[in-house]
Amino acid sequence: MKVTVVRAGGVAGMVLTVEVDAGELDAEATAQLTGLVDACEFPETPPAATKGRADTFDYELAVERDDGAVRRTRFGQGAAPPGADALVAWVLDGPHGHRHVGRW
Amino acid sequence: MSQKSIARVGRRGVSDVSGTLTAVISCRCEIAPPSLLLRVAERGGREARDAALRTLLTSAALRSRRTALGATLRRFGLSPADLEFLPAQAPATGPENTVYDVAGGGEEALPGRRVRGTDDPPTGDAAVDQAFDGAATTATFYREVFGRDSVDGRGLDLVSSVHFGRRYDNAFWTGDQMVYGDGGGGVFVPGGLTRSLAVIAHELTHGVTQFSAGLAYRGQSGALNESFSDVFGVLVEHRAGDVDAASASWLVGEGILEPSLGGALRNMIAPGTAYSGDDQPADMDAYADLPVDDDPRNDNGGVHINSGIPNRAFAEAARTLGGRAWETVGPVWYEVLTGGRLAPTADFAACAALTVRVAGERYGEGSAQQDAVRGGWEAVKVRLPADPR
């Protein structure tokens, strides 16, 4: 399983992409990640309450299962679907992710 | 309650509203506690709701000069712009300047605990004191250079919240207040966001834009929105340090990024060179034609990307003239932003044409200042109306 968070916008306007590959994690971290993914909802049309507000963040959260199935959701700051904030924070702030700054 | 509804209440006034409960509310704010008014606003009939909300907002405005209104307004989906019917605050005293500590909380916790007010001494918390000083410097800039009374031109209180979120790498304007994270999340150095006067002035200028041209935050109008914030963010910094346009670095947010990323958020004179991964175009030949969609990579149609083009137009014009940019080209950009002639959906060409026109009005047709403004836009290859000379 791979979990990818794209965070863009903010005063910097940077695009930060952080990817976590569960295959590289120890058992404890894998369990944490799996629990967070299972608790996260991926609505097709999440609320976009903050879209268009200057310098807030916009997010894309994608989970690719080992069978190739992908679940994806996009949302603005303050409008995360249930469970997404915790998963995004774990990926962005934890020590396990591969980080990349740049649009592509 | 809709914006249309509040506008209607504003015109009509509370005293015209009938009904026993409404009459109780309307006779004077002080007898009904805010908690009761909120319950009425949420659960009462339409007229009672209107009266209760107007009473809440009016009494809060008079008591606390709108400082505490943010949460109430957000609760009803409103912004300070919806309070235009309220009397302006006294320009002579300037806006109240208040800083709150949100202590790691999120938007639901705003504004947080009040930690410093207008007349209070420094707290010793660097984020609190920098946010306070930066807001004061920015408000002084707008008042002394352009005669503008705070963000809305009517004395709106300056409200800042610091220590937002955990290692939150951002600062933003909510529509009624400033919010600063502590940084340290891999993009900004810890404490960097409040250390940069340009960042503080950039965000407060989003408020100025909100209350003036109202540039839509998408595509070219959104890039202009971002650019005006960069322009006045830098000008506030230039004035504070008495920096000459000819020798200025034209960097926005210098020295606050993690050093591995680069030296600044943006380079106005050389867009695309501020940090590793900076993809701002330097002219229209490299314009990023991105869709306005929900993909965060597309940046609402490139608002932070293509802003490099008008940024450079301003910097080129200011550098051509030299001296104090806030006294040369700055007033032209300010008149364009606030003078009522720039449409909310304006594109680069419309903004460019207006700056040339305003420069002619201010300094004379064919003046060195107008030529410098025209030259700035020509440098970035934005199409201008033909020069009549």
Image: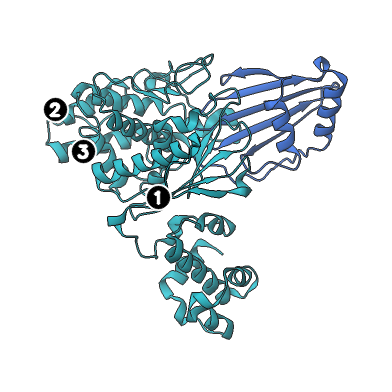
Chain colours: A blue, B cyan
Cβ–Cβ below 8 Å for labels 1 and 2?
no
Q: Label 1's element?
A: loop
Q: Quadrant of residue A26?
A: top right
- Say which chain tag 2 marks: B
Q: Which residue is mark 3?
A: B357
Q: Nearer the viewer, residue B259 or B118?
A: B118
Q: Earlier in the sequence, mark 3 or mark 1?
A: 1
Residue B253 falls in which quadrant of the image? Answer: top left
Same chain check for tags 3 and 2: yes
The residue indicated by pointer 2 is B368
Can you say which quadrant of the picture contains the C terminus of chain B?
top left
- Closer to the chain start, of discs 1 and 2, is 1
Q: Chain of mark 3?
A: B
Q: Where in the figure is residue B363, as x and y percent of width and height?
A: 13, 36
- What x and y, as percent, mark residue B236? 32, 34
Tell me residue A25's x, y (percent). 82, 18
Residue at 21% over, 34% down: B327
Viewer-nearest residue: B193 or B114: B114
Q: Is residue B231 left or right of residue A94?
A: left
In depth, the one of B175 and B361 nearer the eye is B175
Answer yes or no: is residue B344 visible.
no
